[in-house]
Image: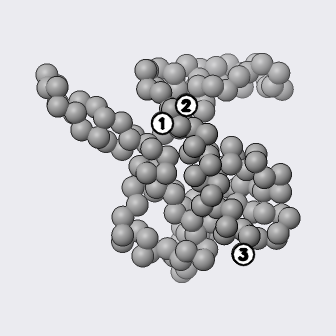
Amino acid sequence: MLLDVAKKHPDWIVVPGPMQFERSRHGDRNADFIVIDTGNKQSIGIQVKSSVRDETIAKYDPAWIVLVDGDTDFNNVQAMRTKALSSDQKVVSWAGILSAHHLSKLSTKNRPLSSPDRMLLMRQRLVAKAALSDVKVKDYPEIIKRIDERISPKLAD
């Protein structure tokens, strides 16, 4: 998702957060990803959580970190039956819906891949398609816009 957001900003680079952030004495600056705006010489950390609660918000410094909530920001929830032989459904967090959607749409055409890498990507696409089954991601462009609107102001400061 962050890479799709970064496509809209040619000066942005997205990198994984270094492992040192996990063990830093500045736990309020722990980041899964770093978005760097090379044009403005600014950066911001992105911490992705399945579900953000009040205690999670209090744990992170908003000057350094943008919290992304999988449930609300990514809409990573799915109503599903949780008991066999019951028609009752429960809304559950289903992390990975967007990643599986993105992976299922990746094309191997016109990519400079070795044969083993091409085969691996094709197998991963099939697994993603099977995992998604009939789940549709309807608001992908809206999600990109929502995340962009959360990150852009932090990099403009």
Q: Which residue is mark 1?
A: 97
- Check the image and report above or below for 114 versus 141: above
Secondary-structure class at tag 2:
helix
Across and down, in percent, residue 135 comes to 43, 26
User: The residue under label 1 is which amino acid type?
Assistant: Ile
Q: Are marks 1 and 2 in contact (CB under 8 Å)?
A: yes
The answer to whether residue 83 shows anywhere in this view is yes
Q: Residue at x 78, y 56 (%)?
A: 12
User: The residue under label 3 is which amino acid type?
Assistant: Asp
Please rate how many residues cluster around mark 3, counting C-alpha atoms within 10 Å: few if below 14, some from 14 to 19, many from 20: few
Disc 3 or 2, which lies upstream in sequence? 2
Across and down, in percent, residue 142 comes to 57, 43
Q: Which residue is mark 2?
A: 101
Q: Residue 31 appears in which quarter of the rendering?
A: bottom right
Q: Residue at x 76, y 48 (%)?
A: 8
In what quadrant of the picture does the C terminus appear?
A: bottom right
- Check the image and report above or below for 40 versus 84: below
Q: Which residue is mark 3?
A: 157
